[in-house]
Image (cartoon, helix red, strand yellow):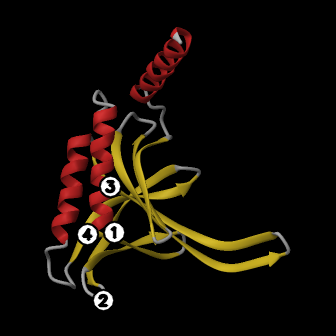
Amino acid sequence: MKRTFLFIALTLASVMAMAQNQPAGIRMEATEITVNDESYSLFTYTDEDGTYGYYLSLGHYDELLSISIGNTSSTLGNFDETCLYLGADREEAFEALDRLLALFDNEPGTTVELPARVATGGERLGGSVNISCLVHKKLLGGKQLLFFFPSHDHSGMTYLGKGSVKQLRRGLSLDKRLRPNKK
């Protein structure tokens, strides 16, 4: 019993130590949710120059072709992703999520420009871009945020609902309780 407890304690200590010294070019997830086949990941990222920040991955997968032969299936598709910049530390990330929630109070058709980074593949982030966020009224009531962003040689689009933003905020709160010494 003591060995098991000691093993768990040492494992947790090493994980916490690794989280404090995040290597450059690696995403470290704080929270992730999936809603209606759309995934949203809130993560931290450190650039090669040491710049640290919180980002929200906004991606959309378009399935172009699906083939099933017997028990084997294969799909061909395109994944567009951009990463919304939330801030240099956890408190700025909370403020950015609160600003996203406040956008739902605006009239449909309201558009704002937000800072983001291009996802270059391999979990790395590229240059800075501004993306458009449109407050959109859903067909059956309610609102959602539509994000339009550059992706490779075309424009990508994804959406985010108010419930999703609230879930991401709760996930970030849980991350704060689990890792209180993180920025």
Q: CA distance from mark 4 to mark 1?
A: 6 Å
First along the sequence among labels 3 and 1: 1
Q: Is residue 61 left or right of residue 39?
A: right
Residue placed under numbered mark 2 in the picture: 140
- Residue at point 43% right, 40% down? 47
Q: Quadrant of residue 112?
A: bottom left
When the figure is inspected, residue 109 is found, relative to residue 106, above or below; the finding is below
- Residues at badges 3 and 1 in contact (C-beta under 8 Å)? no
Label placed on residue 168? 3
- Residue at point 28% right, 37% down? 176
Q: CA distance from mark 2 to mark 1?
A: 26 Å
- Residue at point 55% right, 16% down? 4
- Residue at point 18% right, 51% down? 95
- Residues at badges 4 and 1 in contact (C-beta under 8 Å)? yes
Q: Amino acid at mark 4?
A: Glu
First along the sequence among labels 4 and 3: 4
Q: CA distance from mark 3 to mark 2?
A: 24 Å
Q: Is residue 133 left or right of residue 25?
A: left
Residue placed under numbered mark 4 in the picture: 113
Residue placed under numbered mark 1 in the picture: 131
Q: Nearer the viewer, mark 3 or mark 2?
A: 2
State the quadrant of the C terminus. top left
Helix, strand or loop under label 4: strand
> In the image shown, does 21 or 166 lie closer to the viewer?
166
Q: CA distance from mark 4 to mark 3?
A: 21 Å
